[in-house]
Image (tube, grey):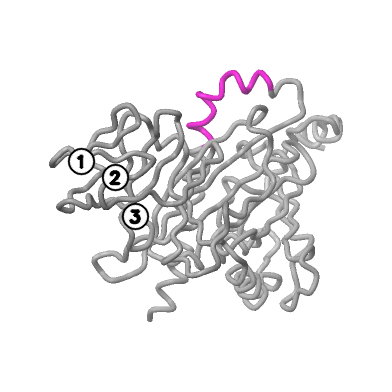
Amino acid sequence: MSLLDALRDRWPDSAPVRPLARQSWSRQRPTYREAKPEVIEAAAARAAARPSGNWFVLAASTDIRADRPFGTHVGPAELVAFRDQDGGLVVGPGACPHLGAPLAAGRVECGTLLCRWHGLPLDRDGGPGWRPLPAHDNGVLAWVRLDALGGEEPLPAPVLPPRPDPATAIAAVAKATGACEPHDIVANRLDPWHGSWFHPYAFARLTVEHAPAVDVVDEADDRFLVDVTYALGPRLGVPVRAEFFCPDPRTVVMRIVEGEGLGSVVETHATPLPAGQDGHARTAVTEAVIATSDRPGFATAGKIAPLLRPLMRWGAARLWRDDLAYAERRYALRQS
């Protein structure tokens, strides 16, 4: 028996971190038989049929500041966002109604956006020829409602899953952009079988315990249940059980349901962008990691949250660097 084997035998069950046995990447159990394309596509199609109320993720809440405007696009719509005097989120068209100047190049003073070309003032009540759009800020992500783009029955707020209490959680938001459609991002996340094959640096011992049938009847069964160990290095990991589900057409949520970090969630949101110069679709991926724990030491972790958030963003961005290649490949194959 090796020293590591002896250590594993004596490792306390209460410890969140577990030693990992050395395993060759090529000797993992193949998952291609379980990862049935019809199951993944059916799950993505059911997600696409769910109502969104025309809400789209705009940015991380921290991206929208009171001292300068934030400019972006959702689909073909140019948008600008800023904070009013009370810190409230204001979102509206990004082109000045006067002569079309980019409002994102303006300035915000005392809750009023001033156009840089001629000083036209705009605030939460609007301005000449300019009206704000419905917006929502939950402290982690900023949303905008675009009824013309969504084409659905409007809802008063985004369709959001339960989250940990922000007061006891640590949240970080990572962003990436890919040459694909939102459907490709969702389908990527609804294929948990690729995790330890495509991301061996992050996942080990991944087993899909439950996958929804192609013809799901009970909404509660429309989820993937996965046992996985999050790798902290080549020889240590944190085993958890997690569920994956879609609350709306452009969101996939991963929630830890057993193990360390119970209740923590990772929300992956796909927002359409204007087509690229090559005419191909573009999609923004906004991933919110909201971590919590009932362990006493987590309160201490909260005190160093400014140091942890960059690491959390780095980890999410690393995964999406790979997964965007996966999503872009799906899109490219459809175009060929």
Q: Residue at x 76, y 48 (%)?
A: 241
Q: Earlier in the sequence, mark 1 or mark 2?
A: 1
Q: Position of residue 319 (x, y in %)?
A: 51, 49
Residue that numbered label 1 is attached to = 120
Q: Residues within 10 Å of mark 3 (few under 14, many from 20)?
A: some
Q: Name which quarter of the figure residue 293 lies in.
A: top right
Amino acid type, mark 2:
Gly
Residue 63 among those drawn in magenta: no
Q: Residue 212, relative to residue 61: is it above or below?
A: below
Magenta stretch prevailing secondary structure: helix
Residue that numbered label 2 is attached to = 127
Q: Nearer the viewer, residue 37 or 93?
A: 93
Amino acid type, mark 1:
Leu
Q: Residue at x 35, y 50 (%)?
A: 131
On screen, residue 291 versus residue 215, left or right, reads left
Labels 1 and 2 touching (C-beta < 8 A):
yes
Report the Cα–Cα distance between label 1 and label 2. 8 Å
Q: Residue at x 74, y 78 (%)?
A: 215
Q: Residue at x 55, y 43 (%)?
A: 288
Q: Residues within 10 Å of mark 1 (few under 14, many from 20)?
A: some
Q: Quadrant of the C terminus?
A: bottom left
Magenta residues, start to end: 299-312
* Tag shown at residue 73: 3
Q: Earlier in the sequence, mark 2 or mark 3?
A: 3
Q: Nearer the viewer, mark 1 or mark 3?
A: 1
Q: Quadrant of the N terminus?
A: top right
